[in-house]
Image (spheres, helix red, strand yellow):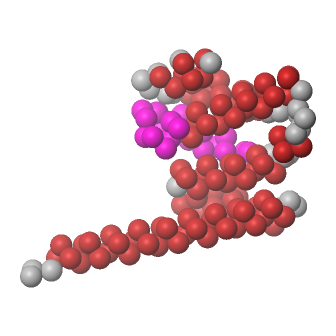
Amino acid sequence: MFIRNELLRRPLWDVKEVEYLRAIIRVGYPRPFQEGNLNREEMSLFFDFTASTLAMDARILTKAPISVAARELIIQTMVNELEAEFPERRRSAADSLLEYGAVEHPKIRAAVERLFEDEDEQTAQTVASHVASYDRRRKQHENYALKARSAADDPR
């Protein structure tokens, strides 16, 4: 409740807000959600983890006010999650980094692409597909921007 009712409503996030969420993410949860049959404590940890990652995603994707240091800390958190124990966490982190556009940084791109060889076949295929989709959308956007500039330069 604190995350949704207090933290997300703060006018500006700095390192303090992100560190709170990072602490929850570091605790994680004891076994993959996909296994099912989690007990009440495990479910609570899973929901806290999910709320924390979604809050970070929301802050960046909605372009809500955030300090440069806090944004970098969120990105580093997701880069760290690429090494998480559970495949679902690795896939989610890769998706977040793609959505943030952080994969434009070569080191982050390389870290995400390492998941193409993930031990979990679903993770390897999903991440490869999402990166290909990201690249396709980026290329389309570049083409549209180029056409728009050409049309604006056309004296007719």
Q: Quadrant of the C terminus?
A: bottom left
**What residue is drawn where x is 54% and y is 60%?**
104
Image: magenta residue range: 58-81
The percent coordinates of residue 21 (x first, y second) are 65, 28
Image height of 150 relative to 65, above or below: below
Whether residue 144 is visible to the viewer of this picture, yes or no, is yes
Whether residue 27 is visible to the viewer of this picture, yes or no, is no
Number of numbered discs on residues: 0
**What residue is drawn where x is 65% and y is 31%?**
52
Q: Is residue 17 left or right of residue 140?
A: right
Residue 38 located within the stretch drawn in magenta: no
Q: Is residue 54 left or right of residue 60?
A: right
**What residue is drawn where x is 85% and y is 23%?**
40
Q: Is residue 50 left or right of residue 154?
A: right
Q: Nearer the viewer, residue 39 or 136?
A: 39
- Dividing the picture into quadrants, the one containing residue 42 is top right
The percent coordinates of residue 72 (x first, y second) are 56, 41
Q: Quadrant of the N terminus?
A: top right
Instruction: Please tell me whether the stretch drawn in magenta is mainly helix, strand or loop.
Output: helix
Q: Is residue 15 left or right of residue 122?
A: left
The percent coordinates of residue 109 (x first, y second) are 63, 61
**Residue that protrudes farthest toward the front in the picture:** 37
**What residue is drawn where x is 69% and y is 35%?**
50
The percent coordinates of residue 143 (x first, y second) are 38, 75
Image height of 8 relative to 108, above or below: above
Q: Nearer the viewer, residue 68 or 135?
A: 135
- Dividing the picture into quadrants, the one containing residue 37 is top right
Residue 61 located within the stretch drawn in magenta: yes
